[in-house]
Every structure is written in C-alpha cells, then in structure tokens.
Amino acid sequence: MLNNVTNFNMNKSLLLNWINAVYQENRQTGNRAAIVLSGESLFCIETVRCFINHLRYESVIWVSPELEHAIVPEKARMLLGRECDALVYDAGSQFNIDAFGAVSGIVKSKGMIFLLVPDRKKSASYLSDSRFFNRALNSSHKYSNVYFLEKNSALPDIHQCQQNIVEQSVKVDYPFRTLDQQRAVQAIIKHIAEKKIGIIALTSDRGRGKSSSLGLAAGMLLQQPVKKIIITAPRLSNSAPVFHHAKEISSAEEISAGKIIFNDASIEFIAPDILLEKKPAAEAVFVDEASAIPLPMLEKMLDAFPLIVFSTTVHGYEGTGRGFALKFNKVLDIKKPGWQKIELDTPIRWIKNDPVEKWIGSMLCMNAELPCVAELNEINKDECNFQLVNRDKLLKDESKLTTLFALLVYAHYRTQPSDLVYMLDSDSIRIYTLELNNKILAVTLINEEGGFDKSLSSQIYKGERRPQGHLLAQTLSFHAGFECAASLKYARVMRIAVHPELQRQGLGSYLLQQVINQEQVIGMDAIGSSFGATVELLNFWNRLSFEIVRTGFTRDHASGTHSAVMLKVLNKQTEDIFEELRHKFRSYIKDWLSDSLKNISLDMKQYLNNNAIDNDGELTEYEWKDIKSFINTHRGYEVCMPALIKLIKKYDKFICHLNEQQQILIAEKIQQLKSWPEVVKKSGVTGKGEAVEYLRVAVKELLIKAA
C-alpha cells in the first residue's frame, strides 16, 4: 500500500506509481476502477492524459461538452453497444448525469472510468451547493476501487480486494459472450423458427448483453426461413446495438437507418405508435427497452401480434425496469398464460460484484427497492402522516431517499437519474409524502412555476423566450394565448406515485387533496399537471375538480398519446382569467378536431367533444389577439387556427385581391384544412416553415385589403 501522505500534484513519479498500482489491482481482480478528479479543468485534463499515456490503454473514449474530438454528452447514448478500456467523462462545466449513467456501462472489466469534476469548494462550481453531487462524491469512499483525487490533497490508499484471482470464465461458442446469452439466443431462435405462438420476456440488469442477444437472434434468423422481423423501441437510437449485432452476424446489407436485408429477408425498425397503427405482417416483433414504452401500448401489441419478444433492463441507468416487471408480468399472466421468461444474469463487460457498478448504482438509485407493506391492508387515511419533506434531512436518511425514489421509478416509465438531481437540488421543488408506520405510501413532486414580470411575460407570449422548468406558465401563455398567464404562480404536479400494492384505495387522491390545500395556503394561483392524456387519467384529475385547458397537437411516438394540461384554480382573484382560458379552449376544440387533432384516439375525441362548445358570433377579443400574434410574433399556426378560420369566413370576399400563391395557401390550409405536405406541394413553397411564414404575410395582406 502506498504511503498516504503524498501531495499527488507535486510528485509525478509517485503519482504514476499510484495509478500503476490501481491498474495492477484491476488486472489481478478483474474489477474496474473509478477515479474522480476534482480541480480546475486544465489540471484535471492534464492529469488524466498523464495517466492514460502511462497505462497505454488501447481503447479510450472521451466525453466532454467542450474538448475537441470528444463526444458531447447529448450524443453519448450513441456509444451504447460499444466497449472501451477507459472512459474519460468531463463534467467540469456541466454534468449530464443521464449521459454519464448510460455511458459508464461501456467500460470493460479491468478498465477505468475517469470522472473530471470542478473544485467543489469554489462557490462558482455547481458542486458547491448540490445535494445530489455532494452525496455522490461523499459516498465514493464507501466503495473499493472508487478513488477521489483532489488537487493539493493526499493520494488515497489503494484498496486491497479480497478477490485475488479473476475467476476462470466459462468458454462459450462464438459469437456469444456468456452461457446465459447463448442459451437465451438459442431459445428465441428455436421459438421463432418453429413458428410457435407466444410471448418471450427477456430481462436482465444492464451490461448483460440483452440488446446484443436480440441482435444476434435476429441476424441468425435472417439466414433461416424467416422473412421479416420488426424491431420496435422508444427511439430508433435505442435499437442501434440490435441492428449492429444483427448486421455483423448475418453480413446483411443496410439499406437505410433502421432497416437491413439479407437476400429476401429483412429486419426493420418501426416506432411503437406506427406499429400499432399499421400492424404490418411479420414472423416476430422484438420490443427493445419495453419498460420505456407505456403499459397500454404493450397491451395493444399483445392483441395485435402473435409472437413477440419483449426485452427490458430491470436495474439500469434509465431506472424503469422494475415497474415493468411488476406490472407487465401480471398482464402477461392474465392475457398470455404460459409466456416464457428468460433472464440474463452474467455480466458481459465486467465481473460480478464489480465495485464501480455498485457505486454508480447507488449514486443513481438504480437499485432502489420498494418497502414491504404486507402488514398494511385496509388503510385509514386519517391515520396517515402528510408531510412536506425537508431535503437536507432526506439527504441524511439514505433509506428514505431510495424508498422515495423507488416509488417514482415504479410509477413512471420515463424516470431518469436527472429526475433525482432535480428532486434534490432545484429550488422550485417541493416533495410531499403520505406515510404510515414510518413507511412511505405515496409521494408527489411539486414544481413552482411562473410569477414572471410584465416584460418577460410578453417575451414568452411572443415565443422569444422559453424559461426552462416553467411548463405551465409557458404553455398557457405561448400556446393557449394568454400573455398574463406567465405572470401567475403555478404549482405543477410533476410526479405522483402510490405504492403499487396499495393502489385503488384512494391514497393518490387523498394525497393530492392535501397538497391542493397546502399550495393554496402558500399562495399559488393554480395547481396543474401535464401528461400523456388517456381518458382514464383525465377522469382521475376531473374527480379532483381539475379541468382540461390545453392539448398538444403532436403525438408522442413512444406513448402514442397527445399531451394534456389539467388545471385547478386556487386563487379567487385570478378566477376570471382561468375561466376565459377554459372557455377559449372549449370553443376551439371542434376546429382542432377537424384538422390538428383529427388523428387523436377515438376515446379522446369523444372526451374532447363532450367538453366542446359552439364558437359562433363575432370575433372575440382573445381571437383577435391570436390573429395579431400569429401575424406579428412566433406563435404557431395550430394554436391560432380556429381564430384564423373565423377571420377568413368574415373577410372571404377580399381574398381575390391577394396574389395567387396567397390565395392558394389560404384556400388549401385555412378553408379546406389540407395537410401541410399537400399545402406545400400545391403552393410551391419549400416546406412547412416557409408555408407558415407566407401564410402570416397572406393574412396580414388580407386585413389590409379589408380595412
């Protein structure tokens, strides 16, 4: 063990001896190591370059928002499926924790992760007052092979692991990496080649070769009498490792992004919503990262396709798989009894019980588990303890923190590590819990939004500013068209989660009612939420007297839903503003359903129609505001469209005074409600953006002619 008294910034020889000792420990045990370097950027970068040059790693990947030739964090997910000996993650100016969580899994056994962070003692550093990052760095000493190196500080001791020799790995046939993987791929191939009908669920922790197993199975099936396999996932980028391994094992030809062919057989990516809409024929459908797709969509897939392989990460950086396992397995038991479960247990890139993986899992709350509530049957809500959580105290109670986050993970299919950061660090966040016998039964996160001055409110309304973290204030101002809405104060329900074994007892509604009362006392003007709308969810919020005031016009590809904003007024002094907002939304619904929302689901269409009112008579004040803001600002066509339809009906006799292209644009889009591709083709413009800009000019000219 090295002497723990050396200032590593002063003695390069001792520094290299130290990193070499870490390297040798890795070689002996098979473990990975994580080195957290803290200091100014130049010091961190030069130190890690010194390490890497000394160790002579063959494969080193740099991720940085600033360094030349490095991969920017926003594109780090493109690295998934690759492997490297060393990863350098530069978090000096900003820390994209989602990207770090994802990319940390590409480092192989015996490799190293270098995490570069700023000096947390400096007030300008984001680490200085971050609960999340200080928790993460303070926990580094608890894990062997995780070292915190700070400029002008002593070198840490080298951890002597009890494992002295890397376990002899079991030999498997090419191209497989583990027996687990070989058995899984063979089982999938046998099932599909024999044209068996049924469901396979492939689950694993991350790093077990789940996506590569799907790719190998798909590629091998291409060479058998299987003509078509469909791959679906939340995004095409999610399935990149699947296509990589399928192409490699089959020597297939890539004809486009997300499609490869081998002779007359093909593997093709289709987004979940399009898959359910078109229901194309295929021998099998592979659903990668199924846990990141909403449960209702997965259920529809079960009804639409006879042979499906669902795969998902159970404990992973995306933090969603446990909810999938809990909920979806119950659905399979009911709908597809006899479904086959395949689990991958053996890590491919690192050895079992890798200390670095444990540290990252703890840092990101990957392995957070729900509390046991078996002793709680019928719950008396009046006995529950409703409380506003003190986050500084929460940080000192790791068990409560992980339990709280586990509830959020199980409840929401898109929970990410960045949600944990936001929950702990954002000044606008409030956490409320419902507890009984020191166990958290339900939790909700509230984000305080809005309260902008007149100048900024005007800029938001015009589309010139988009303050991050103020969804309700922004959407009600810019999209709904109420400039004053940005100046009001909102409590947005970001997340609400009830323990899955205690649902259907009214705990969620009870918790929300307590939150409503508390937020009203605090002085919020309204409380609301935005989510992928289903009739079931809308009815839940309706029962608490929330009303729908906005829908999104585009459909989410992963969930197949349109977003909705629900709102409940808390301040009587602002009631008139929100009443006008509700009235405007309801009066616009029929026009939207004829164009922008014509492809919305049938049950949602019925729900909206039930809320619609007629929009007859003269142009109202808010309709004139929509028209003028469409002409003069960046507000979109869709949000202003009902007012524009009414305007064209009023002044249709003046359209003939416009030029030919302007007449075509008004006729095709506003009068005949044609799709944008049809409008673009007929009017001769280059695309939707240009069509909208020319339409602004056309409407402005029409008003001039009519004046």
Image (cartoon, rainbow, N blue to C red):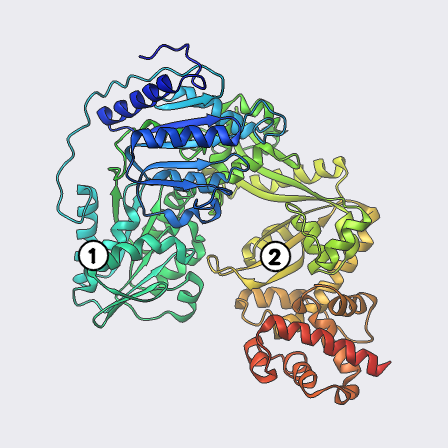
SS for dot 2: strand
- Given this view, does label 1 or label 2 mark the residue nearer the observer? 1
Cα gap from disc 1 to disc 2, whole angstroms? 44 Å
Give me the residue at 64% from left, 79% from top.
669
Q: In which quarter of the image is the C terminus?
A: bottom right
In screen coordinates, is 107 left or right of 445? left
- Tell me, yes or no, if residue 365 can be seen here: yes
Question: Considering only order in the chain, which callout, 2 or 1, is on the residue closer to the N terminus?
Answer: 1
Question: Is the residue marked by circle 2 packed among few (<14), some (14-19), or many (20+) residues within 10 Å?
Answer: some
Question: Is the residue marked by circle 1 packed among few (<14), some (14-19), or many (20+) residues within 10 Å?
Answer: some
Above or below, 328 against 418 in this view is below
In screen coordinates, is 31 left or right of 436? left
Residue that numbered label 2 is attached to: 564
Q: Which amino acid does label 2 sit on?
A: Ala
**In the image, residue 181 lies at what x, y percent?**
21, 45
SS for dot 1: helix
Query: Which label number is shown at residue 249?
Result: 1
Give me the residue at 31% from left, 71% from top.
281
Residue 495 placement: quadrant: top right
* Residue found at the far right of this picture: 707
